[in-house]
Image (cartoon, grey):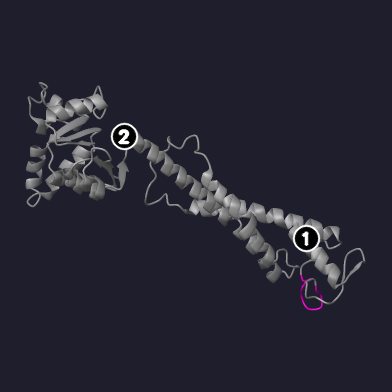
Amino acid sequence: IMVTGDHPVTAKAIAEQVGIIAPNAITLEDAAKSDKYGGNKSMVDEKDYNAVVVPGWELAKVLEVEQEDRQQVENFWNTTLATENIVFARTSPQQKLLIVSAVQDRGGIVAVTGDGVNDSPALKKANIGVAMGIVGSDVAKNSADMILMDDNFASIVNGVEEGRIIFDNLKKSIAYTLSSNIPEIAPFLLHIILGIPQPLSTELILAVDLGTDMVPAISLAYENAESDIMMRPPRDQNRDNLVTRKLIGFAYFQIGVIQALGGFFSYFVVMAYYGFPPNSLPGMTTEGKHFLPSGSNPVLNSQGQLYGHDDQIDVLTRAQTT
């Protein structure tokens, strides 16, 4: 959508040059000039045009009847904003603000570019206001969320790409951090419920969280962009949040479960190596069967070997660190 204070003829010519109005587009005025409609724009079928150039005075006439016939105004916005190529010309600051509000009311995410004082209300109202850093007025800069220091619209694309990279990398870091919760909680649950020797100590959890997890999580913030990052459609602000159900499901029930299974496999292999197969571990920590650092009773393994307190600590430490 192009919104300008220039004359409609000038605005249309510029819009055609920069591609806002497609080369083969048919404007409402062009369709109305055909013999079918005889110059009556109100009779033109929506299927016969795909571009509109709305002068500010026509917009003012439509908005004048808003109090009396609000439905007519709604129909105007619905029809105009559904057109593929849209140009608003000779618009006032108030009209620019109304255009932004109309697009937002219909679920649009609005970015407004501007450099003058007249653009400041629309820049403030938009979801993101972009002001020119060189030729832009101070009022416009103060109202904007982003300032183009080189006044080059291509910098907006670079900013969007950088923002998507940051968003992607934050999701990766969060997913990596959350994935360790399941393999850290599951050993304690089995220790409490089944009474197996504790597969993971609190000291090792702190070592994982504060030691081995921290550096990889930070390093994910410096990942390069994915190959399709600028090919994706804009994300839905109400659905595509930083932490979603999909991300939690991936971190907890896919990666987390795989990590937990890998950890338990190593734990059971080491315990079986020392003569304590998996089927002998449940109930090991109940009364009379100590396999804890605080345990004092000797434990007999499946091979008939007796493990005292120090031996139990040694075996359990090996199983936990594996």
Instruction: Report the disc number at residue 307.
Output: none
Q: Is residue 272 above or below residue 292?
A: above
Give the SS element for disc 1. helix
* Residue with the most extreme right position: 304
Name the residue type under label 1. Answer: Ala
> How many angstroms separate mark 1 from mark 2 (CA)?
59 Å
Magenta range is: 283-290
**Residue 284: within the magenta?**
yes
Answer with left or right where residue 232 lies relative to residue 317. left
Question: Could you tell me if residue 18 is visible in this image?
Answer: yes
Considering depth in this image, is 102 or 18 the residue closer to the camera? 18
Q: Is residue 287 left or right of residue 136?
A: right
Q: Quadrant of the N terminus?
A: top left
In x, y percent, where is residue 145? 30, 48
Q: Can residue 27 be seen at all in this image of the molecule?
A: no
Q: How far across and down, in percent of the image, does residue 189 sit? A: 66, 67
User: Where does the C terminus fall, quadrant-wise?
Assistant: bottom right
**Residue drawn where x is 87% and y is 74% of the image:** 298
Q: Residue at x 7, y 24 (%)?
A: 38
Q: Residue 48 appears at what percent x and percent y?
A: 19, 27
Residue ID at (80%, 56%): 269
* Image vertical order of residue 164 relative to residue 198, above or below: above
Q: Which mark is residue 153?
A: 2
Looking at the rendered structure, the kind of residue marked 2 is Phe
Q: Are marks 1 and 2 in contact (CB under 8 Å)?
A: no
Quadrant of the image occupied by residue 156:
top left
Q: Position of residue 131 (x, y in %)?
A: 26, 42
Residue in the image at 81% along x and 58% along y: 270
Q: Which mark is residue 319?
A: 1
* Number of numbered discs visible in the structure rendering: 2
Packing grade of label 2 (10 A; few <14, some 14-19, many >=20) is: few
